[in-house]
Amino acid sequence: MVEKSPLQLTKQPTKHPTIFADSIYKSYMVDGRREPVLAGVNLTVNPGELVTIIGPSGCGKSTLLNIIAGLDQPDSGTVELDGDAGRNRLGSIGYMQQKDLLLPWRSVLDNAALGLEIQGVPRRQARQKALELTGLFGLAGFEHQYPFALSGGMRQRAAFLRTMLLGQDVVLLDEPFGALDALTRVQMQEWLMDLWNTLKKTIVLITHDVEEAILLSDRVYVLSTRPAKIKLMMEIDLPRPRSFGNVTDPDFIELKTRLLTLLHQESPQMSVG
Amino acid sequence: MRRSVKEIEQEQPSENPVSDGLTATASEASGSSAIHVWPEANRNGRMGAALLRIRSWGIPIAILAVLVGAWELWVQLGDVPKWQLPAPSAVAVELLDSRALLWDHTLVTLQEVALGFLAALAAGVIVAALITYSRVLESSIYPIVIASQTVPVIAIAPLLLIWVGYGIEPKIIIVALISFYPIAVNTVDGMKSVDPDMVRMMRTLGASRWQIFSKLQVPTSLPFMFSGIKIGISVSVIAAVIGEWVGASEGLGYLITYSQPLFLTARVFAAIVLLSIMGISLFVLASVLERVMIPWYHTEKKSKSSGRI
């Protein structure tokens, strides 16, 4: 127990980390066998940070995010949201999955307003609030279009808008740009950083793209293969604001090489024959 | 940053495969070019769409005309007695001459079909909702639904007459019994077809079970429900006729059973023609309703198949 000096006692108490995941264990029954997915994952996300989780395919990244979001319960271990472990996190944490999951029968505006409507906000008011942000999300002029008429990038942004409209401070993103082509992905990455800067959210992002992880985040967690635990946490101390041009900087390349090497060690080797 | 977002927007209008005029120039261009281009290639232009519709209706009508023509020739040249097989021309004459009589009976059958079908629709949707909402209800109700279909209606119909009487009620019950099944089964499939990722998404927005049901499952089930409706409404007409055959004093089915022993074969055919028209019109009505209620479903499929996304 560290002694606090009188000076420290008059300061503000240290804020809780926004997310604190402690010894998360999770397994699934597959064909009658118990398959361990997560074996003691520890994760901390501080207020206002952008943290990335990266790892080999199928290592349980999405499972971890599901647990953090409150969709699933861990077999053991706790997740604290703002220091509170007993609280129902479902609905308090924004969660965007890889598919845009827009409701095809609703216009862009109504899709964006969906979260607010569910919370009980009357439709007209919800639409009004959504309308205020369509410009920021690059959807101005497309409010009354249906999802099928939009391109992939626009649909992703519409899904973003829906997630952000609920005004939650924490947002989880599961490979949000995975389904996009390379060009759109770069634009979206820069747009996300801009948005994060403007709205001051705490973001946890899953990606398999090493460049994306280094470009966007403050810290990167590397997850091992199943049963997964945190293999490494890497601080990305590159200066902000960052842009796609930084990808060729020597610092960036050094971090990228380190990360790639670590990931390569983790992935099961494929052999021929 | 703002500027690069705007650039993305400006590119969109020309890429958008939206069918009905996102920009005037897009639809004009496709409209005028459709005259010179094979219609298949240009479903999204108004001219192209109209041409395609004419082509698609023209073929079955032409086939029908050929068959009717052959029928007429067969009767005339083969000197077939009119009580055995009337010529199409004789049927047409009968339709005209007895139109008042035929119209009265048509209304009766139509009433049976409409009321029975609406009852089936209400019951089908409610049962589907119950089955989807609770697994307990599913295992208890669903087998009964299926079993109900295995009992031959023709066997039940006379019993209904004994229990309910000779009025319009037994016919409505028979129509409802027969058209209930396709509606219920299709709607259940529709409600179950909901994407589990969508459900997860709704849960992360904080949706309650009821909200997931009303805002997600119900709209998802609509295309399936309409499939069930189209099937149900087609068999409704047959069901009404079966009901009338077993015991009635009005209706087109009754007219057929009454006219046959009197060898008024042209009248029998006239009634059959009217029943056909009724069935087809109701089907078309259901299709139109479908396009009105789930416009997104068809435009989504159309733009996907045009391969321009």
Image: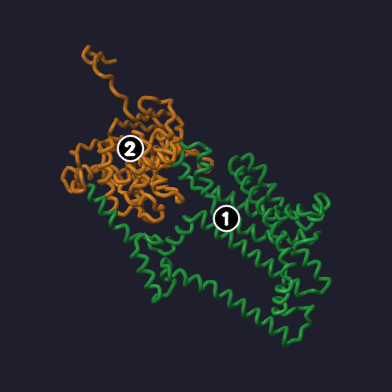
Chain colours: A orange, B green
At label 2, counting other C-alpha atoms closer than 10 Å, the crowd grade (few under 14, some 14-19, many 20 or more) is many
Front disc: 1 or 2: 1
Residue placed farthest to the bottom in the image?
A: B77
Judging from the image, what secondary structure is the residue with disc 1 in? helix
Q: Quadrant of the C terminus of chain A?
A: bottom left
Residue annotated with mark 2 = A204
Residue A36 appearing in the image? no
Query: Badge 1 local density, few (<14 within 10 Å), some, or many (20+)?
Result: many
Q: Is residue B108 above or below residue A99?
A: below
Quadrant of residue B100 within the rendered picture: bottom right
Seen at 58% across and 75% down, the residue is B61
Horizontally, residue B58 falls left or right of residue A127, namely: right
Residue A127 in percent (x, y) is at 39, 42
Query: At 39% across and 75% down in the image, what residue appears?
Result: B37
Q: Mark 2 belongs to which amino acid? A: Val
Percent of width and height locating residue A44:
32, 31
Q: Is residue B81 left or right of residue B53?
A: right
Please provide percent x and percent y for residue A91: 42, 34
Q: Nearer the viewer, residue B42 or B114?
A: B114
**Foreground: A248 or B233?**
B233
A183 versus A59 height, above or below: below
Viewport quadrant of the N terminus of chain A: top left
Q: Is residue B133 visible?
A: yes
Circles 1 and 2 in contact, beta carbons < 8 Å: no
Indicate the chain on which mark 1 is placed.
Answer: B
Q: Which mark is residue B226?
A: 1
